[in-house]
Every structure is written in structure tokens, then in C-alpha cells.
Amino acid sequence: MRKIVFLLVIISFSCRSNNESPMKSDSGKQIPILAWYSIPPEQTTLSRYLELKETGITINLSFFKDAETMAGALDTAQKAGIKMIVDCPDLKSKTEETVKRFMKHPAVAGYMLRDEPNRTDFPELGSWAKKIRAIDDNHFVI
């Protein structure tokens, strides 16, 4: 039941009119709203990212084939005023290089390791997360 209520809150927030202010917490901070695997990489355009922004999305997660396409998406997201979670194979194969490349980009919200890992993946993911955090401790790792 709580999942349904949460989903309805997210849907109702996403359908708000454009003249309403973003959802704020009691402390006055904006509550992050995530689009999970939303816009396909081949549709990475400013107009598509502005659509996300208009619905109240503040963070976008989409998978990109490499760091180059990820960089382009980050630049587009910055222009639209939203953040991105870095998710590309280079994050694993070239962790240090990729994190150093993106850690100061204003559109970076965090880093994505793997969706729905099983328990046998945890030691590897823990090591990978520590490697990222040793380079960039200012962004989250999920």
C-alpha cells in the first residue's frame, strides 16, 4: 500500500502545472525527483531534457554506451537545469579516468554501478564504490 501511495505522490507531482514551485522539504531544500532510464541516448536533445525539467524531474538516469556520449548528455542536462547519474561502461573499465573526467561537471549528481545486484555482487560493488569515493567524495554512488 505504501508503494502505491508513494507512486501516486510522484505521479501527481510530475503532473503539476508549470507555474507551481518545485516540491520542497520542511527544511526548504528541493526534493530530488529521479527519472529512471528515461530518455534513450539517441534522443538526447535539449528539448527532450527540458520536457523532463518541466515535469519536475531534477535527476535523470539513462545508460550511455561510452564516456563521450555521457559527456554530451551531461552538457545537455546542464543546459536544461537538471542533473545526471553517470552510467556508462567506462565507469567500470576506466574508473579513475572516468570519475576524474566527470567529477567537476556541474550536472553530475552521482554514479551508477549496477541495477538490482544480487548478494554475490556486493564485495565487487563495494570495492568499486570505494575506488570511486576515493577520487570523488562529493557525489553519491548507487
Image (tube, helix red, strand yellow):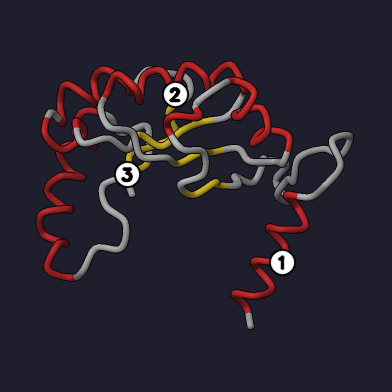
Residue 71, given in percent of the width and then of the height, sits at: 36, 19
Residue hosting label 1? 8
Q: Quadrant of residue 42?
A: top left
The answer to whether the residues at label 1 and label 3 have Cβ atoms under 8 Å apart is no
The answer to whether the residues at label 2 and label 3 have Cβ atoms under 8 Å apart is no
Residue 13, given in percent of the width and then of the height, sits at: 75, 52
In-front residue for pair 86/134: 86
Residue hosting label 2? 73
> What is the C-alpha distance between the residues marked 1 and 2?
29 Å
Picture mark count: 3
- Note whether 21 is above or below 4 in the view shown: above
The amino acid type of the residue labelled 1 equals Leu
Q: Residue furthest bottom?
A: 1
Residue 141, given in percent of the width and then of the height, sits at: 32, 44
Q: Quadrant of residue 116?
A: bottom left
Q: Residues within 10 Å of mark 1 (few under 14, many from 20)?
A: few
Q: Residues within 10 Å of mark 2 (few under 14, many from 20)?
A: many
The answer to whether the residues at label 1 and label 2 have Cβ atoms under 8 Å apart is no
The amino acid type of the residue labelled 2 equals Ala
Q: Residue furthest front?
A: 42
Callout 2 secondary element:
helix
Callout 3 secondary element:
loop
> What is the C-alpha distance between the residues marked 1 and 3?
26 Å
Q: Earlier along the polypeptide chain: callout 2 or callout 3?
A: 2
Instruction: Check the picture and name the quadrant holding the N terminus.
Output: bottom right
Q: Which mark is residue 91?
A: none
Q: Nearer the viewer, mark 2 or mark 3?
A: 2
Q: Which mark is residue 112?
A: 3
